[in-house]
Amino acid sequence: METGEIIRRVMPAQTTVTGGSLEQKQQWMPECGVLGIVWGIRLQFSNGVTRYVPDLCDRMKDAQRLLNRLVGASLHPDFLSDILEDYLGELYGPPIFQENAKEILHGL
């Protein structure tokens, strides 16, 4: 690199969340010893990418609230895990207190 040369960062192209849906599934909840329902979201982005988070939370209204915030938002799929971490922190407290936060975000 020569003196005075400008370094340009390559940022991912901005995309928009064009649609999404809630999805429920049954999951064993060892802390309760029961089979319960958990809610996830599936998101479609304007660049053709689809992302699925199968077990976001155990209350439909919490999953719906996040889905409502995301649809229409300008967001690159690579940053979805950051948004989810912030939202889980909003619901349940800082991530340091969430034993399963890494499991939820793993694989995104």
Image: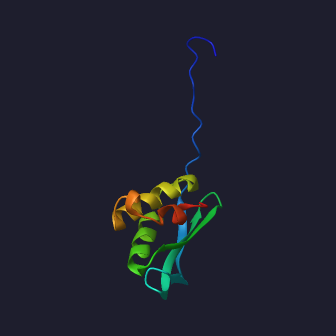
Is residue 82 toward the left or the right of residue 8 in the image?
left
Task: From this view, report whether residue 107 is shown above or below residue 56.
Answer: above
Task: From this view, report whether residue 54 is shown above or below residue 35.
Answer: above
Q: Measured from the top left, where is residue 9 in percent x and y? A: 57, 33
**In-front residue for pair 50/59:** 59
**In-front residue for pair 88/6:** 88
Task: From this view, report whether residue 93 is shown above or below residue 57.
Answer: above
Is residue 86 toward the left or the right of residue 12 in the image?
left
Residue 54: which quarter of the image? Answer: bottom right
Q: Measured from the top left, where is residue 75 in percent x and y? A: 51, 54
Q: Measured from the top left, where is residue 55 in percent x and y? A: 52, 74
Task: From this view, report whether residue 3 is shown above or below residue 64.
Answer: above
Q: Measured from the top left, where is residue 30 in percent x and y? A: 49, 81
Is residue 44 toward the left or the right of residue 88 in the image?
right
| Residue at the image position 42 percent from the left and 70 percent from the top | 68
Residue at the far top: name it: 3
Residue at the far bottom: name it: 34
Q: Quadrant of the N terminus?
A: top right
| Residue at the image position 57 percent from the left and 29 percent from the top | 8
